Amino acid sequence: MRRTLPAAITLIAGLIVIIKDIFISPGFNQLVQDYLVRSVALSSATAVALGGLSLLRVHGRRVSRRREGWYNSVILIGGFALLFFLGILLDGGHNSDTYQWFYQNTAVTGSSTVFSLLCFYIGSAAYRAFRARSVEAGALLVSATIVMLGATSIGAAITPMLPEAKTWIMDYFNTPVIRGVALGVSLGSFAQGARNLFGIERGYMAE
């Protein structure tokens, strides 16, 4: 039962969605859509609740044991509790002015700060990648330089050929590669879905 029940639920749910897409029936399609919306909402709410409890448990244990960086966990738990209770107690919930003020001045500004630091790592990675140690690396260096200059006004000021070369590279090299990758991902997703549907892949059952 421990293996059969999850596999049966997966098979039935998958077949329902497949039948919905193959056979067009407004009533049946609406029923399936309502079922999927409710299922996704319930699953998302459960996942968020479990994630919040796990976050509090992990960081609460770090604070209680005074591990390295425990004060960061105190800030995290405090911010989590503050926004959680503000969203519940205030009129309007997360749309209230007070909640939005705290959110915009904590989460948004913090995220912007973290992402702004990534530019240094991106610059370091680009420097290492742009070393022409082989023919392939040299081609990457030349094409990346052309694309970057062609996408800026400086490149157009240097020569009108740079924007045209950038467009040519994006259309005749970048687009076909992206389509090939997308095709491979689609086939892989189809194969993985079939494995899950027929019980061949049981990773979602922690096996």
Image: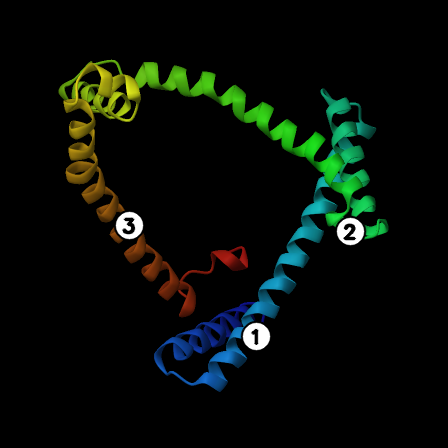
Q: Quadrant of residue 98?
A: top right
The residue drawn where x is 77% and y is 28% is 75
Q: Secondary structure at mark 1?
A: helix
Q: Dot 2 corresponds to which residue? A: 93
The residue that label 3 is drawn on is 182
Q: Which numbered marker is on residue 34? A: 1
The picture quadrant where one finds residue 85 is top right
Q: Is 147 drawn above or below residue 6 in the view shown?
A: above
Count of numbered circles on the image: 3
Q: Nearer the viewer, mark 2 or mark 1?
A: 2
Look at discs 2 and 3 and give the one toward the viewer: 2
Disc 3 marks which amino acid? Ala
- Nearest to N terminus: mark 2 or mark 1: 1
In the image, what residue type sits under mark 1? Asp
| Residue at 77% over, 34% down | 79
Callout in the foreground (1, 3): 1
Alpha carbon distance from label 1 to label 3: 30 Å
- For residue 156, above or below residue 166: above
151 or 171, which lies in front? 151
Name the side, left or right, on which 56 lies relative to 190: right
Is 61 located above or below residue 180 in the figure?
above
